[in-house]
Amino acid sequence: MISDIVMAQVERDGELDLAEVTSVVSALLIGGMVTVGHFLASLLLLLLENPEQMAALRHDPALIPKAVEEGLRVAPPAMWQARRVAVDTELQGVRLPAGAVVLLVLGAANRTEQKFECPAHFDPSRPNARDHLRRPTRRVRAPAAQDHSPQRHSAPVGNAPAVAD
C-alpha cells in the first residue's frame, strides 16, 4: 500500500515529496489503529447492552460476521468523512461542482428508516445488515449516497457550497 501511495504521489506531482508521503502513511497507520480500537469498543458495548444478541453469538459463533456488519452500521468508527467531488454532478437536484467538498454523514445515512427497519436497534439478524455505508472510498458515486441518505441540510465547509435536499 505504501508503494501505491508513493507511486500515486509521484504520478500526480512528477516527483517524490517525502514529507507528504510520510504524513499520509502516518495518518493511515494511526487512523487504522484508532478506528479499529474504537469500533471494537463500540461493538462490545452494543453486545453488553443487548445481552440476547451476546447470548446468540455465544451459542452460534458463525453469527459474528453479521454482528460485525451490524455494528459497523449502528456505530461506525468514523461518523463522517469529507470527500472532494471529482466531476461536476448533481445530487437530488443540487449542483455539485468538481472540486467541491461534500460531507458524508455515515452515522445518519446508516440509520435511515427508508433503508432499515427500526434503524437505531442493534440487530445482527437484520437481512440487510451489510447494506450500509461503512468505508466509502474515493469511488463513492452519488446514487449510492442518495439511496442511503435521509433528509439533511449541511453548512458550507470552507469554499464548498452548502448542500441541501
Image (spheres, helix red, strand yellow):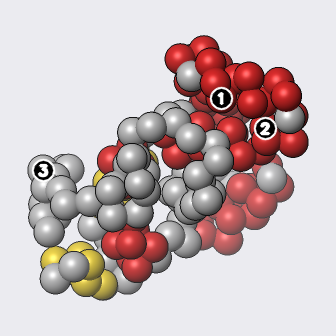
Q: Amino acid at mark 1?
A: Gln
- Residue found 27% across the figure and 67% down from its top: 100
The tag earlier along the polypeptide, 1 or 2, is 1
Q: Amino acid at mark 3?
A: Ala
User: Can you tell which quarter of the image residue 94 is in?
Assistant: bottom left
Work out whether residue 84 can be spotted.
Answer: no
Check disc 3 and report its element: helix, strand or loop: loop
The image shows residue 134 at horizontal and vertical percentages of: 55, 51
The image shows residue 145 at horizontal and vertical percentages of: 39, 68
Q: Quarter holding the C terminus? A: bottom left
Check disc 2 and report its element: helix, strand or loop: helix
Say which of marks 1 and 2 sits in front.
1
Check if mark 1's residue and mark 2's residue have beta carbons within 8 Å: no
Pointer 3 local density, CA inside 10 Å: few below 14, some 14–19, many at least 20: few
The image shows residue 156 at horizontal and vertical percentages of: 14, 53
- Residue found 77% across the figure and 60% down from its top: 4
Say which of marks 3 and 1 sits in front.
1
Label 1 – label 2 distance at C-alpha: 10 Å
User: Can you tell which quarter of the image residue 68 is in?
Assistant: top right
Q: Amino acid at mark 2?
A: Ile
The tag earlier along the polypeptide, 3 or 1, is 1
On residue 64, the disc is 2
Check disc 1 and report its element: helix, strand or loop: helix
Pointer 1 local density, CA inside 10 Å: few below 14, some 14–19, many at least 20: some
Give above or below for 64 relative to 66. Answer: above
- Residue found 41% across the figure and 54% down from its top: 117
Task: Check disc 1 and report the residue beneath it.
Answer: 53
Give above or below for 111 relative to 57. Answer: below
Label 3 – label 1 distance at C-alpha: 38 Å
Work out whether residue 147 can be spotted.
Answer: yes
Task: Check disc 3 and report the residue beneath it.
Answer: 155
Pointer 2 local density, CA inside 10 Å: few below 14, some 14–19, many at least 20: some
